[in-house]
Amino acid sequence: MQRPRYDDAAIDRLIWQAIQDSQCPEDFRAYLDHRPENAAHLDEALDRLVELDDADAACAEGQRCYPAAVAAIEALANAGDATAQFHMGKVLDNGIGMPSDIGRGIAWYRLAILQGELRSHVNLAAILLTGDATPADRAEAHSLYEKAAERGEALALFHLARLAGGDLQGRADQLRVFEMLHAAWEAGDATAGHWIGNKLLAGNGVRRDEALGREWIVKSAEAGCIAAILQSGREAEFRRDEQADFAAAAAWYRRGAAMGDIECQCRLANLLLRGEGIAKDGAQAVALLKPGALRGDPYAQRMLGLAYLWGVDVVKNARFGRKWLARAADGGDADACYQLGRLMAGGEAADLAAAARLYEKAARIGSSEAQAALGVCYWTGRGVAADAHVAYKWIHLASLQGDPWGLHLLGRLYYTGIGVPVDCAAAARCFMRSATRGHAPAQAKLGWCYLTGEGVDRDVAEGMVWLQRAIQQGHAEASTTVGYVLRDGVGVTANAAEASEWFLDAAEKGDAAAQRELALLYAEGRGLRQDPDEARRWMEKAAAQGNEEAQTWLVKTEAEAACVFAVPPAPTPA
């Protein structure tokens, strides 16, 4: 049985004639969403959409050309053309280029069905199953699928098998479903092969056979089933018992990307940006992300925004980066809200209130990072009125998701008694949970707890283990703490010379406390040669970061110098 071929050439010509000279990006976005069978202008439409969107082109509702295209299709549909009637149903059902009107869409589908248009059978059946804009009618949906299947529509055969799989429970019934799926595969539906493969992998209604199941998944992917392509790519990229095969994953994603699938484009772009298993190519990644981003996919928009901000093999463009992050945030992408909030919180033109609002939006969606960031806003009063109890609420929510930063912050709240009573034991437990997840600041704090015996039994050796783990990640505060241990002889023989090396390591990384301690060693000549100039240089660095002890030292030193070099008053004549 051969699957029917559909001829949408006339519809495609009508649409393109109406929009080809348009200056509205929405017209070309609608064409890409509409995508008539064998559409002839997909690449051209994407190029125009990129050009107009990069120029931030916009147009009023009355300037859009797609409504004219729809009007032309409607005229053809009113003249009795079944293909045009199907496309009117599709446009109204999905809201392509105009507001959605499922009721009118159903009416056009029914007219097309009277003339035997098989895609209308399938689309109307889907609406009847969900009950969108009309009472659900499973019996009519089943009848529509059967009529389309009898005339060779493989997708209808697949849906019949899917419906049967949900209704029938016995082994004999499941074998019948398997046979129906095989019939749909033979009729040309690639998705049926994907279902057959997964049934074999799971032993669902048939004898479990992993080798044969994977063979079916590959056959389905090669036949163009996007779900099978994605499954094959993910299995290669995220293998549990074997080393990941990024090259194989990229090959599968590339196949799906060429078919226009947004998720495949994004996954391939992610591999290209990371350069894992394949050559790093940010420019190609950006080219892959743009189609999905322009069609409104929040994940593609976020990745594209970050690529422009990072400048990965593309020219850094902060305006483009913010624009795409903002679109992803508007689309409800929590990570985009968080990343955009971080941008808003930094730089000379910081908008702390806007950053806090973005953090809250992401936090309410469930982003643990945003929950922690919002907690910090309430802790410090940045962008919102300071409120220790609200800070605790958001940070606690982040910690409940196992977020390492959230756990570390919760430990600090318990350690300092902000929003909750002081509880060093609870603080140490939070630091431990965060530290075991690899969070360097928590490792440093846990090391300090073991050195001092705060919240845990004092154990200098264990403390040094955690400090070293933090240092291996480049954490400056941990190096400063080791400097204190060596300078003061905490559980080890005091050694100011070695301490100075640790202070220098942290000072060069910008730690103000280390800069101050290094300056004092230079001033006193402890562990290294006394050098007042170096002492002053490092103390000024610490003071510039707001270190109050360094600022006090500089004021005191300047006052003492003024006394030493003051010129004594001339003696009064007798």
Image (tube, grey):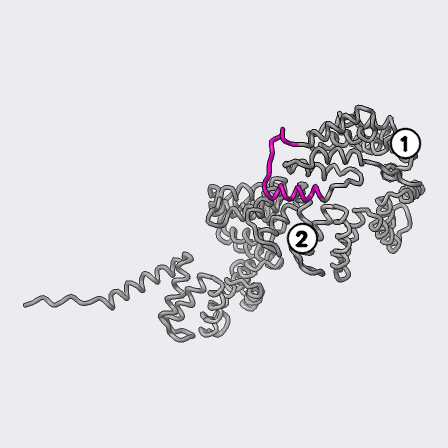
User: What amino acid is at disc 1?
Assistant: Lys
Q: In this view of the protein, which residue sits in the foreground, 52 or 551?
A: 52
Please tell me how crowded label 2 is: few (under 14), some (14-19), or many (20+) other residues with Cα within 10 Å: many
User: What amino acid is at disc 2?
Assistant: Ala
Q: Earlier in the sequence, mark 2 or mark 1?
A: 1
Which residue is located at x 56 percent, y 69 percent?
461
Q: Position of residue 296 (x, y in %)?
A: 66, 41
Left or right placement of residue 570 versus residue 535 in this view = left
Mark 2 or mark 1, whichever is nearer to me: 2
Q: Are marks 2 and 1 in contact (CB under 8 Å)?
A: no
Q: Which residue is mark 1?
A: 147
Q: Position of residue 346 (x, y in %)?
A: 50, 49
- In the rendered structure, find residue 285 and report the number of the disc placed on it: 2
Q: Main secondary structure of the magenta part?
A: helix
Q: In this view of the protein, which residue sits in the foreground, 323 or 73?
A: 73
Q: Please state the total of marks drawn on the protein image.
A: 2
Residue 88 seen by the camera: yes
